[in-house]
Amino acid sequence: MLNQLPLEGVLVVTLEQAVAAPVASCRLVDAGARVIKLERSTGDFARTYDTSANGQSAYFAWANRGKESLVVDIKNSEDVALIKRILSKADVYLQNLSVGAAARAGLGSHDLRSEFPHLITCDISGYGEKGDYAQMKAYDLLVQAESGLISISGGPGELGRVGVSIVDTATGISAALAINEALVRKCKTGLGTSVKLSLFDVMGEWMSVPLFHHEEKGKGPDRIGLAHPSITPYGGFATSDGHVILISVQNDREWEALATSVLKRPDLVEDPNFNDNAARMTRRSEVDGLVQDFFGRHTKAQMTAKLLEARLAFGSLNMMEEFVRHPLLRRWQVESETGSISVPAHPDANREWRQLSLPRIGEHSDAIRAEFAD
């Protein structure tokens, strides 16, 4: 069937909380998988982060649509037996409890794969499962700090976190990708496999470029706000009517287009002080000053027209009030016990909206217990 979603028929069981694992399983839901979310009687603690999404937690509303909620006590042998009956028919088991907690309850991935060779297991930890860091709590901000991300973000002055949960999100998307790879392997071999990710490892890989810079130069990229550490002009410039437009001149061809078609300064193309990026970087303040002077004498509309005509890369510096009205912001409606919630749509523009709801705590417990009764 052409309209069938790619993961229809796939059963995923999650012992998840907070953000990283729920983001991963949300991607699987959106692809058609059935996700049974195991929750304690008080629910995933992300449910109570805030009430910003029509009375629901913004984080929970974002990452838990379409899941089924089964309340269990993993210290209760009967509930563990129930979970194993479900896992015997499941394709994927995903968990992000503290290191060792699932194993102590008899739900460790290693033992489960021995019992159920078909099962794909995915364990998400903060800093891996071995070594001095293994038992440390690892929240998004803490891993931003440990991985060096904060040290290269923002502008000079006071340090600050990246404004979204980038570590959790990156790890969740990485986990979803790894699980999908494992599902392809299972289709070929019939066997499950083990996936292990840590928040730190994911950000370690994402930090490759700053790492290379540090190893070559003995220091990481400077925190220079909207500018680029090795390219100019690249950054934000204020227009005469108080807006900020960011431009990105990535090569000398684009510099020529900016100089001749926008700034009306063809002399800058041949001038050895400006004709290539290396020369411009030694005169960053002068280059940025030339660009700012021109932008400051034109409105946002005028500069937008000029940059479009020159086919240069640019974008507006939007505040949240402008982002929520952005013409490209697509929305899906998700139902919840407090009413409809408008969430940003799945990033695949071809992915059709489906009627998905946020589960109440234990909403599906009775039905699931009956379905998987001994």
Image (spheres, rainbow, N blue to C red):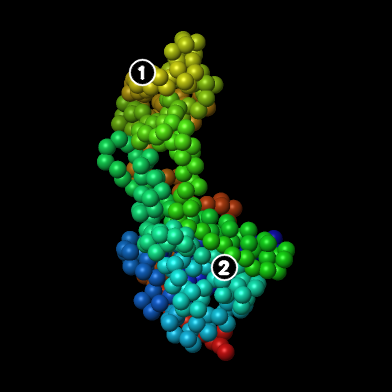
Q: Is residue 343 positioned above or below 99 on the image? A: above
Q: Compare marks 1 and 2 and give the one earlier in the sequence.
A: 2
Q: CA distance from mark 1 to mark 2?
A: 55 Å
Front of the two marks 1 and 2 = 2
Q: Residue 220 at x, y = what percent? A: 40, 36
Specify whether 104 is left or right of 187: left
Image point (34%, 48%), residue name: 161
* Secondary structure beneath label 1: helix
| Residue lying farthest to the bottom in this orientation | 374
| Residue lying farthest to the right in this orientation | 188
Specify whether 347 is left or right of 361: right
Q: Where, by quadrant of the figure, is residue 326 drawn?
A: top left
Q: How many circles with numbers are drawn on the protein?
A: 2
Q: Residue 226 at x, y = what percent? A: 37, 34
Image point (51%, 76%), residue name: 107
Q: Residue 311 at x, y = what percent? A: 52, 27
* Crowd tier of the residue under label 1, counting other residues whose Cα lies within 10 Å: few below 14, some 14–19, many 20 or above: few
Q: Where, by quadrant of the figure, is residue 53 drawn?
A: bottom left
* Secondary structure beneath label 2: strand
Specify whether 47 is left or right of 355: left
In the rendered view of the protein, which quadrant contains the N terminus?
bottom right
Circle 1/circle 2 CB separation < 8 Å: no
- Give the residue at mark 1: 286
Q: Is residue 105 visible?
A: yes
Q: Amino acid at mark 1?
A: Glu
Image point (47%, 63%), residue name: 129
Image point (44%, 13%), residue name: 273
- Give the residue at mark 2: 121
| Residue lying farthest to the left in this orientation | 158
